Amino acid sequence: MSRLTRAVAPPHVVNIDDLRRLARRRLPAAVFDYLDGGAEGEVTLRENCRAFETVTFRPRNAVAVPHCDFRARVLGAELSFPAILAPVGYSRLMHPDGERAAARGAGRAGTAYILSTISGHKLEDVKASSSGPVWYQLYLVGGREAAEAAIERARLAGFSALFVTIDTGTAGMRERDIRNGTGELMSGDIRAMIPHLSQFLAHPKWLTAFLLDGGIHKLPNIVIPGHGPMSLINVAAALADSVVTWRDFQWLRVMWPGPIVVKGVLTGDDARRAIDVGAAGVVVSNHGGRQLDGVSATLRALPEVVKAVDGRAEVLMDGGVRRGSDIVKAICLGARAVLVGRAYAYGLAAAGEVGVARALAILRADLERTMKLLGCISLGDLDASYLDAPPGWPR
């Protein structure tokens, strides 16, 4: 067993929060808080996790469950378990192998990986890294021409689904990033970074890896006609000029022949609009609490969206998933599968691909144990009867 593998093995790492602790130790504050933080007062960030704590289980005891079937079919792909790696912007800041390591980890675990438009590695390299399904998440930063080029590249590379994020009309107010100088780091301007240098010097292993990787890279999947790849610092401003509207889906439907999934749905009305424009699925998501603070926790919004969709599209959910029991609760309330973001990104930041693999192994073991203790043999048997929700929750 290698030193790196031992670092994320028991007893050092037992749960996702242990990986978070290791990530915090390895990363400078500007990078850790970029991953860990949320918008404004971080109310929604906290509520995403707290919502899972307020929902309790109703197990079926005295039931023998020698094995569990937790395979899931999502967007035509057979997954070994219902946890998909969510798009995490510029994962290369957390570890030089970034998105490639995440894709490899997902493939080896038998699940899917969703690549963010704002990634540090070329989409073709990321697709080649995975033995499983890889899907592309689209922002319209850079304009339609840049998006069309990326969509065509993704199609030719073998990406099989397109996730379109609709909740980023402007960047959320992430106060930790302002305090830590995250924008200055991403600008690559050494002079602007001087007030924040101490945090980087205090993490020499991360800093050495970062510098050997070439520092801040441009965004290889947002290629502006006549200018080349977009600089990372331009993304926040570009979001305000690239709002996705429902009319855009007519154009996207022509550009992309495969399934389109709308990410960022929190109401039944938006879920119905997504189906009207031809979406094959929706993701109940508040962007991990990183955009509009004070919106509903996604677990609480999930039943309303499931009811509105009424079986006409697949419903996925993200936000606050840290344990396999969280996955079970989401499926009981109607999700086909969940997306996990911070849970695997903590592992990536702590130990690269080894950390991603450890995060997924923890979630998978949690999931199996929870289902056995519930007395449930298959994901298909899970429903709201296995849960007690607080008064006032939609069911």
Image (cartoon, grey):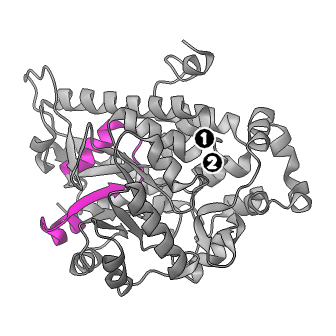
Q: Secondary structure at mark 1?
A: loop
Is 196 above or below relative to 108? below
Residue 86 visible in this rendered orientation of the protein: no
Q: Is residue 314 magenta?
A: yes
Looking at numbered disc 1 in the image, what kind of residue is underneath it?
A: Asp
Which residue bears the numbered disc 2? 92
Q: Secondary structure at mark 2?
A: helix
Magenta span of residues: 304-332
Give the CA separation, mark 2 to mark 1: 6 Å
Horizontal and vertical percent position of residue 291: 52, 68
Q: How many marks?
A: 2
Whether the residues at callouts 2 and 1 have beta carbons within 8 Å, the answer is yes
- Taking depth in this image into account, of 320 and 96 the one nearest to the observer is 96
Q: Residue furthest top?
A: 1
Q: Residue at x 50, y 59 (%)?
A: 116
The quadrant where residue 302 appears: bottom left
Is 221 above or below relative to 385? below
Is 97 above or below relative to 140? above
Q: Quadrant of the N terminus?
A: top right
Q: Residue furthest bottom?
A: 247
Q: Quadrant of the C terminus?
A: bottom left
Horizontal and vertical percent position of residue 263: 37, 66
Which residue bears the numbered disc 1? 97
Residue 194 visible in this rendered orientation of the protein: yes
